[in-house]
Each structure stands twice: as C-alpha cells, then as structure tokens.
Amino acid sequence: MKPTGSPWLAAGAAAACALLALSYLPVGRGLRYAALGFSSDARLAWLLPLAIAGAFVNERLVRGWLYRKLRDRLAPGLAAPCVALLGAVVPATARIAVFGRKGAAPAFVAGHAFLVGSLLGLGLAWLALATGSTVPGGAALAAVWAAKLGIRVESVGPAVPLLELCASGLAAAGVAAVLWSALAPHREKVMGTA
C-alpha cells in the first residue's frame, strides 16, 4: 500500500479509533459498573513492549499483506470484513491467554474477544484502505492494547463487556466518519457507481 491523503487525517482517524475503542472505560466508571486503576501485574514490563510491537506487526501482516491479497481475489467490499474476522483470531487468543476468563464461561469469553477484535479490525481495515498505510492502524491498535494492559478494570456484572463491544463498533464507525471523503472512491466502487 502506498500512503495516500493527509497524514493529519490519518492521525485523526487513528486517534478517534483508539479513543472510541477505549470509551467503555470512562462510561463504565461513570455508570458505576467498573472500578479503574493502574495495573500492578508484574508481567507488564515485558508485555507492554511486546504488545506495542505486536500491534504494528499484526497490522502489517493482517491489514497489509492479507488485505492486499484478499482485495485482489474478492468482490469489492468483501475484503475488509473478511480481514476483520480473520485478523481477530490471534488478538482474541492473546487476550484470553493474558487476561484469562475471570470466572466467565469459556464460550462467552472467546466469543466476546472475537467480536471486539472483529469490530475494531473493521475500523482498522477502513483506516488502512483510506490511508494506504498500516502505520496509523498500528498506532491505534498499540494505544488500545497498551491501555488494556496498563489499566486494571474490576467490573460488576456483564455491563462492561457489553460496553466494550459497543465501543469497538463505535470505533469502526468513528473511523468511517473521519475518513468519509477518503473512503468515497472505494464506497462508489462497492456500490457500482464508480
């Protein structure tokens, strides 16, 4: 992918993606469904740099290499959702390995992690499509993963996972809104008006 468009627009879309994806934290805190604090996990010293580097590598492989391959083979408009679904598998597995189940049913934890990763991945696919680069998406994903590792969340009931799922969908919608004009040629191709 060759970088296209304004770097400020790409940075704005990446920031919107990260902030909206993490918006469930202050909302959960404000609604008194979550208590927030800084993580005291001893693994944080080596997990944080690994997560940040992993975010950029993940973006390069999933939204770079895999996305380019699927765009050549699939009908217009299908590559982004496919990449979002396929790209959610490794982050969901890593999330379960790092955070565990915390008493929830394994199917619920796995399904939730996969859905959150898929919705966030859809926004990141649109970000890569509109900007022609995986760097803004890598920065957004690194910020999300760093915050999830560094902030300890103690939730009451199922509201916080539901809020996180909604926030991931909101992040994808936020990227689409910020990059509305940059995505216009691709939208027209999908609609058949190009």
Image (cartoon, rainbow, N blue to C red):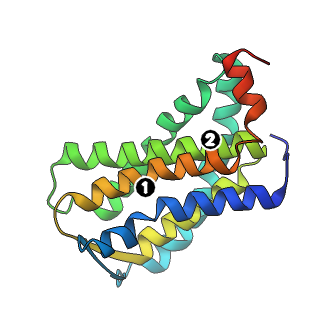
Is residue 54 in view from this perspective? no
Residue 92, how many percent across, how many down? Answer: 39, 49
Question: Tag 2's secondary structure?
Answer: helix
Give left or right: position of 114 versus 56: left
The mark total stands at: 2
> Considering only vertical position in the picture, is 62 above or below 75?
below
Question: Tag 1's secondary structure?
Answer: helix
Q: Amino acid at mark 2?
A: Ala
Q: Nearer the viewer, residue 30 or 63?
A: 30
Q: Which residue is mark 2?
A: 125
> Considering only vertical position in the picture, is 97 above or below 70?
below
Quadrant of the image for the N terminus? top right
Give left or right: position of 16 versus 185: left
Quadrant of the image for the C terminus? top right
Give left or right: position of 97 versus 146: left
> Considering only vertical position in the picture, is 182 above or below 51?
above
Q: Residues within 10 Å of mark 1 (few under 14, many from 20)?
A: many
Residue 140, how many percent across, how many down? Answer: 61, 60
Q: Which residue is mark 1?
A: 167
Name the residue rendered at 43%, 68% in the picture: 148
Residue 108, how many percent across, how many down? Answer: 22, 46
Is residue 53 in view from this perspective? yes
Name the residue rendered at 31%, 69% in the picture: 28
Name the residue rendered at 68%, 27% in the picture: 69
> Considering only vertical position in the picture, is 107 above or below 152?
above
Q: Amino acid at mark 1?
A: Ala
Q: Nearer the viewer, mark 1 or mark 2?
A: 1
